[in-house]
Image (cartoon, helix red, strand yellow):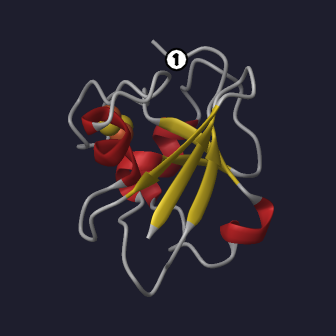
Amino acid sequence: PTIRYTSADGDVREISATTGDSVMQTAVRNGVAGIVGECGGVLSCATCHVFVDAGDADRLPPVGELEDEMLDGTADDRRPTSRLSCQLVVSDELGDLHVTLPEAQE
Ligand code: FES
């Protein structure tokens, strides 16, 4: 599947992702600026915050309880389409995804 990352400035990176990797891991491995993933994907940093496309949002697994709590502490304000990208696992069933990165992420 291809993951498309659009930065807050509008730069687009399209990356062919490995199934089983998270959207955060895919970004970090490929040097996508704007996704930090400081905690390594264990829901304790919220530096992997992304906005998913409204069209993709329904296909994704629902926001978990801890993810929901962490989303309240993101550097950039939470929106209805906010997700933590370490919780989004790439799979053939899910297919291609498009995420937009917040402006602030530290
Ligand atoms: Fe830390 Fe996602 S990488 S919460």
Vertical order, 69 against 22 (above or below)? above
- In the depicted view, which residue is nearer to us: 48 or 77? 48
Dividing the image into four equal quarters, which quarter contains ligand 1?
A: top left
Residue appearing at x 42%, y 60% in the figure: 88
Does residue 90 appear to the left or right of 95 in the view shown? left
* Number of numbered discs visible in the structure rendering: 1
Query: Could you say where residue 4 lies in the image, as x and y percent from the top left?
Result: 57, 51
Q: Which residue is mark 1?
A: 105
Which quadrant: the C terminus? top left
- In the depicted view, which residue is nearer to us: 106 or 1? 1
Q: Quadrant of residue 103?
A: top right
Q: Quadrant of residue 65?
A: bottom left
- In the depicted view, which residue is nearer to us: 106 or 67? 106
Query: Could you say where residue 66 lies in the image, as x and y percent from the top left?
Result: 40, 50
Secondary structure at badge 1 equals loop
Vertical order, 37 against 52 (above or below)? above
Residue appearing at x 26%, y 59% in the figure: 21
Residue appearing at x 77%, y 69% in the figure: 55
Q: Residues within 10 Å of mark 1 (few under 14, many from 20)?
A: some
What type is the residue that disc 1 sits on? Gln
Does residue 58 appear to the left or right of 49 in the view shown? right
Residue appearing at x 25%, y 37% in the figure: 29
Query: Could you say where residue 12 lies in the image, as x and y percent from the top left?
Result: 64, 37
